[in-house]
């Protein structure tokens, strides 16, 4: 997983894998873009206006597990 913040654009980008996205879903009101691979798995997301977010609610559920 890679996390990158671009201060100039105020976008936080999270990449879960190195797979290239083939489709994106835009949630304009939330300021979130979710990227999917060719098997419809989430491979990344972009969060716009990151510095203005206090309590972000993502349009999907995240489950973390130990590896």
Image (cartoon, rainbow, N blue to C red):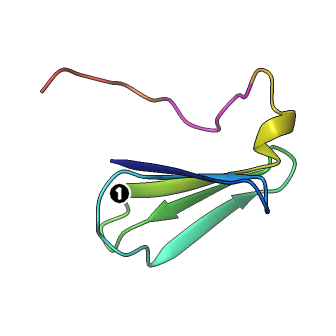
Task: Look at the picture and state if 40 lies above or below 27.
Answer: below
Residue at (44, 29) in percent of width and height? 62
Q: Position of residue 14 (x, y in %)?
A: 49, 50
x and y, in percent, of residue 48 in the image: 77, 52
**Residue 8 lies in what quarter of the image?**
bottom right
- Residue found at the far left of this picture: 67
Q: Is residue 56 left or right of residue 59?
A: right
x 51%, y 74%: residue: 23
Assess whether residue 60 is covered by the magenta stretch: yes
How far from the left and from the top, in percent, is residue 35? 51, 63
The prevailing secondary structure element of the residues shown in magenta is loop
Q: Quadrant of residue 17?
A: bottom left
Q: Magenta stretch? A: 56-61
Question: Which residue is label 1 attached to?
Answer: 41
Secondary element under disc 1, as helix, strand or loop, is loop
Say which residue appears at 81% left-offset and 38% top-offset. 51
Q: Nearer the viewer, residue 16 or 12?
A: 12
Quarter that holds the C terminus: top left
Give coordinates of residue 26: x percent, y percent.
Answer: 71, 61
Image-based side of 11 in relation to 62, left or right: right
Q: Which residue occupies 37% across, 25% down?
A: 63
């Amino acid at each position: 997983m890679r996390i990158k913040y671009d201060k100039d654009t105020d976008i936080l980008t999270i990449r879960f894998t190195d797979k290239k996205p083939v489709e994106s879903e835009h949630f304009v009101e939330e300021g979130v873009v979710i990227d999917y691979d060719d098997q419809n798995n989430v491979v990344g997301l972009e969060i716009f206006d990151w510095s203005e977010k206090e309590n972000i609610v993502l349009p999907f559920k995240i489950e973390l597990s130990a590896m």
